[in-house]
Image (spheres, helix red, strand yellow):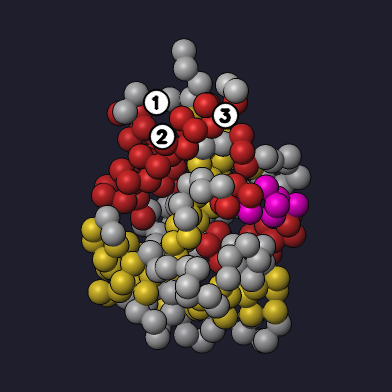
């Protein structure tokens, strides 16, 4: 039997808001359709982790308390996640998981909390101005319909390096000003879309294809 596709769900027990775990279940189903078994590992507090052992990383959203707990532990994994991303491997990050890839987030009281500082963007929290509701936006893979619920407003610091995941039709996306949703960098997608986002089969199948390509690359490299 061939080796299964390996998916790392970062902090599955803590970062799973509004059905985000459904994204991994949908991918597993689509990969099974294509003839691939999947192994999903929960990478949680205190565990060892090498991103290059996996074909896909998933990082869901969480409530404020859970995010504060994760933020302390997550720093141990910065270098392996950064190297994995820079090597053009696929990753999907939702809401809080998306925010963690940036430089920092600023709380409503003005306190700056460092994030992983892997990608050039930051998030500012506005507790009195929550962005919530159904969303629709256009991506390179077609229309996406989802649900957002966040107080964080994300802004790109280097627009030459980062691209939006989509252009808003309905809803807020990254912030009320830019009319853009999420982030694209190499094979990484960050998004505020819950629901889960991969109920949009067009996006799910595109990501599944990227995972299969990453799986083949990992097997080829380990067989050298």
Q: Nearer the viewer, residue 30 or 17?
A: 30
Neighbor class of circle 3 (other Cα within 10 Å; few <14, some 14-19, many 20+) is few
Q: Position of residue 154 (x, y in %)?
A: 51, 76
Decide if residue 92 is on the left or right side of residue 145: right
Residue on which disc 2 sits: 212
2 or 1: mark nearer the eye: 2
**Figure quadrant of residue 102:** bottom right
Which numbered tag is attached to residue 221?
3
Start-end of magenta stretch:
76-82
Tell me if residue 10 comes above or below residue 101 in the rendering: above
Foreground residue, 188 or 72? 188
* Secondary structure of the residue carrying numbered label 3: helix
Q: Position of residue 25 (x, y in %)?
A: 41, 39
Residue at the extreme front of the image, as rendered: 224
Q: Mark 2 touching mark 1, by CB under 8 A?
A: yes
Query: In which quadrant of the rendered image does the C terminus lie?
Result: top right
**Is residue 22 visible to the viewer in this orientation of the structure?**
no
Q: Measuring 51% from the left and 48% from the top, which residue is drawn there?
A: 88
Question: Is 86 a magenta residue?
Answer: no
Write down the residue under mark 1: 36
Q: Nearer the viewer, mark 3 or mark 1?
A: 3
For the residue pair 136 and 157, the one nearer the viewer reads as: 157
Q: CA distance from mark 2 to mark 1?
A: 9 Å
């Amino acid at each position: 039997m061939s080796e299964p596709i390996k998916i790392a769900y970062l902090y599955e027990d803590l970062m799973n808001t509004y059905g985000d775990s459904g994204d991994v279940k949908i991918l597993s189903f689509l990969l099974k359709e294509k003839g691939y078994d999947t192994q999903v590992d929960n990478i949680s507090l205190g565990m060892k982790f090498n991103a290059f052992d996996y074909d896909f990383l998933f990082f869901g959203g969480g409530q404020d308390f859970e995010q504060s707990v994760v933020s302390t532990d997550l720093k141990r994994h910065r270098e392996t996640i950064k190297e994995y991303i820079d090597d053009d491997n696929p990753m999907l990050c939702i809401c809080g998981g998306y925010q963690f890839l940036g430089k920092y987030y600023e709380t409503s009281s003005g306190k700056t909390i460092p994030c992983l500082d892997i990608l050039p963007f930051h998030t500012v929290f506005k507790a009195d101005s929550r962005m919530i509701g159904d969303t629709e936006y256009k991506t390179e893979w077609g229309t996406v319909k989802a649900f957002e619920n966040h107080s964080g407003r994300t802004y790109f610091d280097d627009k030459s390096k980062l691209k939006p995941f989509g252009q808003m039709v309905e809803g807020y996306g990254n912030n009320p000003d830019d009319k853009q949703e999420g982030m694209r960098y190499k094979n990484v997608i960050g998004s505020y879309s819950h629901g889960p986002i991969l109920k949009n089969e067009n996006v799910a199948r595109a990501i599944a294809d990227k995972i299969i390509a990453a799986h083949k690359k990992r097997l080829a490299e380990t067989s050298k």
